[in-house]
Amino acid sequence: MAMPGTEGQPLRVAIVGSGPGGFYAAEALLESGLQVEIDLIERLPVPFGLVRFGVAPDHAKLKSVTTVFTQIAEDPRLRFFGNVEVGRDVSVRQLGAFYHAVIVATGAAGDRRLGIAGEHLPGVHAAGDFVGWYNGRPECADLEFDLQQEVAVVIGQGNVAIDVCRILASPVDALRRTDIAAHALDALARSRVREIHLVGRRGPVQAKFTPKELRELGTLPGWQPRVDPAALVLNDASQAELTMPGFVHAPRNLDILRGFAQTPTDDGRRALHLHFHRAPVALSGATRVERIELEAQALSGEPGAQSAAPTGERLSLPAGLVLRSVGYRGTPLPGLPFDLVRGALPHRDGRVIDTGGKVLRGWYATGWIKRGPTGVIGTNRADSVDTVA
């Protein structure tokens, strides 16, 4: 009998998830020199995952990678099945029986929670849901965000947190020229948000946003980013981190933030406050969220391994809308092992393993469900190539 992947006996592979990880895995298989038949299985009606539903509508250039994905999808050896959910429409056991190999590329759609009092109050949302809402993700289309509140608080120090701030503050006429969902555009046109607070537990050197995203906050008409100069004073470990490989964006970010801090306050513009060394400790309100309490944090430890600890100093802010952007995590697939701590599939070099470390023959992982929510869209290419290899 011929080996799978040879003439007359194609290697049959299912890829669960059609975001960047899934498409790059398909590309690697198609270019492997093997005879392959690939079925791309997607829970949503349409492909492209994070690129379609996670990239901000005013960043159209980042979405241009879908042109590459479309070319991959045109290969006759690949089929797309939308509206098919593993665990609902087909089981892990069935996939294992039908295919020589299954690559899980489901990403990290779950959000991490703050774990503080008041998080259950109306008006407190996951930033990922807000992003899905303005991008037209089907399960987010009917969500409601009260934009009649005057003060919004965004918790997080990554690009998603900055995207959320920017969409809240962008002129509606500018958003009309994007592919933003119509229901979100209508709601934003009626928005009464007049003040935004971006809150981060660590300092400006440890923030994960990129200079391009940060700089855009300074170009929003009618808004002024405001930073306390004291928050930009670095301890010795943070100063040392500026030259470390894992902090490549930090020097430019710091320059931009110092520019924000040095700009005279213009009371004619709405304030977009950037808070560092502050962690949320409680949310409160009678029938919905009304205030957020923050506690000052002090960094300590070796460069590259600093941790934040509370100092006891508290700050209370009004907060009619709270969006948490403190990280994503994968969600389990019924029938497969799952690492609850990492929020990802346990694996060894891309091979899914059980709780005892045994490789599950024929099962693989790639993308965020493999390594956790790190990296940019292009990072998934090398990751998928490794898994396919």
Image (cartoon, rainbow, N blue to C red):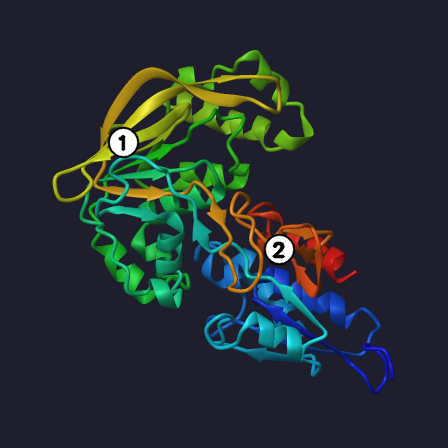
Residue nearer the viewer, 388 or 227? 388
Indicate which disc residue 367 carries.
Answer: 2
Residue nearer the viewer, 11 or 77? 11
Crowd band around label 1 with a 10 angstrom C-alpha radius: few (<14), some (14–19), many (20+): some
Task: Tell me the quadrant of the picture where the N terminus can be found.
Answer: bottom right
Q: Is residue 56 visible?
A: yes
Indicate which disc residue 270 carries.
Answer: none
Crowd band around label 2 with a 10 angstrom C-alpha radius: few (<14), some (14–19), many (20+): many
Q: How many marks?
A: 2
The residue sitting at 75% across, 55% down in the picture is 386
The mark that comes first in sequence, 2 or 1, is: 1
Task: Tell me the quadrant of the picture where the C terminus can be found.
Answer: bottom right
Label 1's element?
A: strand
The residue sitting at 55% across, 61% down in the picture is 106
Q: Residue under label 1, please give it.
A: 282
- Residue 175 screen position, x and y as percent: 36, 57
The residue sitting at 59% across, 53% down in the picture is 345
Query: Relative to 156, is 195 on the left or the right?
Result: left
